[in-house]
Image (cartoon, grey):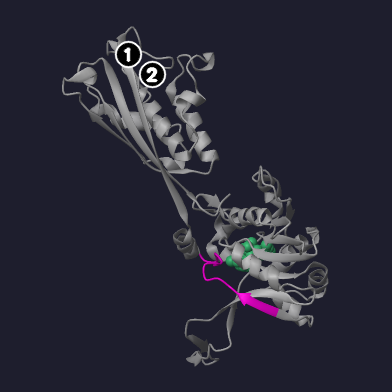
Amino acid sequence: MKETALVIVAAGKGERAGGAGGTAKQFRPLAGVPLWKWSASVGERLFKKQLVDECILVVPESAVEPVQKETPGWEIPFTVVPGGAERQESVLRGVRAASREYVLVHDGARPFLSCGLVERLVDSLTDEYGVVPLLPVSDALKKRGEDGAFSPFPREGLWITQTPQAFHREKLLSVLATHGGGAKDEAEAWTAAGYPLRAVRGERRNIKITWEEDFSLAELYVQRTFRTGTGYDVHPLVPGRRFILGGVAFPDFPLGFAGYSDGDVLVHAVCDALLGAAGLGDIGTLYPAGNPAFKNISSIRLLADTAKRVTESGWILEWSDSVVCAQEPKLAAFLPPMVSKMEEVLPETWRGRVHLKVKSGEHVGPVGHSHCIVCFSNATLWKPLDII
Ligand code: CTP
Ligand code: MG
């Protein structure tokens, strides 16, 4: 078994992606997840497959502490260290912090690292050879001459270099420490020191986010998984109780919901749809009647807690639709304030994704005779497949 450290460098300024004026690219979200976390998360997966034994993440000095807090529960030994002004300096600090015999140096700006690529790299790795992923150039090339004119340039024999790049750690350390600087990648410093290089097949999906438009391209590459949940609730209407629906109070309506909580059937159904989609059970189990903590509780608070649980499991709301079946009061005009009330406790990125409808009971059955109000909801959630 080769003992290997994954060193992810994410300490740059991201200037070409517009980082100078705001957040550097490695901290911007891709499908709701900070860019650095994509490859770091693959590190966790590689650890579970026993392909990698530790992960070193190199970030700007000011980000070391906040980033350290964002990897709870990972099994891979994970170290965050500050980088330097040049990429080579950041790599050097990362490789120094590593403790295994071999290192894989990876750009934090390449979110779609695959386990297959790492497997090929580790397979080819020896004490002697460095290994890099290469892709043949597929576009026609032009070269601009000193006179400014473009002329064709043969692409035969030219290769695009990706990361991770794999090396014997001690050797790479001495190579980097003695290299004059300015190397575009580790392979350049490695070959300049006279060491041999091998190639494995790179992957077209293993793109580096360099320019602003690469973020939208990367969004298209993200593989998502979707899940849908359903929710249903019914509460009897009785005198002497408050009528609160979708978090909105109707003080002039003479009936209210019988129930242990405030009996808000709409919020309950939405909670159950969300919990169902995330595979987290239902409100009856999470907030049981009989527990004094939930006696007459505002159901909006249950929705806030539900949304927190769903978000912490990595799920993002795509859409939720509900239908409230009620004879009276007339609800159509109150649907927008109900949406607003519920959205107040949902993550900001979920805004505009809750849809409500209302149906009368047509004067038949328990709904039509105002004995109860019924609500049906569904929710569709998604999350990126590659994130742990
Ligand atoms: N990098 C680093 N330390 C530096 C410079 C770069 O760790 N001093 C990292 C980047 O964070 C990135 C990877 O090296 O993950 C590849 O570099 P690049 O794409 O050039 O990123 P930036 O240098 O941040 O971007 P730019 O060159 O546009 O400023
Ligand atoms: Mg750079």
Q: Amino acid at mark 1?
A: Gly
Camera-side residue of 109 and 363: 363
Where is residue 10? Give x, y as percent: 65, 59
Q: Is mark 2 within 8 Å of ligand 1?
A: no
Q: Answer yes or no: is residue 63 visible.
A: yes
SS at circle 1 = strand
Which residue in the protein does label 1 denote? Answer: 256
Left or right: 41 in relation to 148: right
Residue 24 visible from this viewpoint: no
Does the residue tagged 1 have its C-beta within 8 Å of any atom of ligand 1? no
For label 1, the crowd category at 10 Å Cα-Cα, with few meaning under 14, some 14 to 19 and many 20 or more, is many
- State the residue at coordinates (20%, 23%): 361
Judging from the image, what secondary structure is the residue with disc 2 in?
A: loop
User: What's under tag 2, amino acid-wise?
Assistant: Gly
Left/right placement of residue 125 relative to residue 316 reads right
Answer above or below: position of 171 versus 113. Answer: below
**Percent position of residue 333, x then y:** 24, 28
Q: Looking at the image, which residue is at 46% across and 34% down? A: 275
Question: Cβ–Cβ below 8 Å for labels 2 and 1?
Answer: yes
Residue at far top of view:
240
The image shows residue 131 at horizontal and vertical percentages of 69, 74
The residue shown at (48%, 58%) is 222
Question: Which span of residues is magenta-colored?
Answer: 198-211
**Which residue corresponds to mark 2?**
263
Residue 40 within the segment the image draws in magenta: no
Work out how far the residue at label 2 is from the one at label 1, CA to CA, in angstroms: 8 Å
Residue drawn 60% across and 65% down? 116
Indicate whether 93 appears above or below 70: below
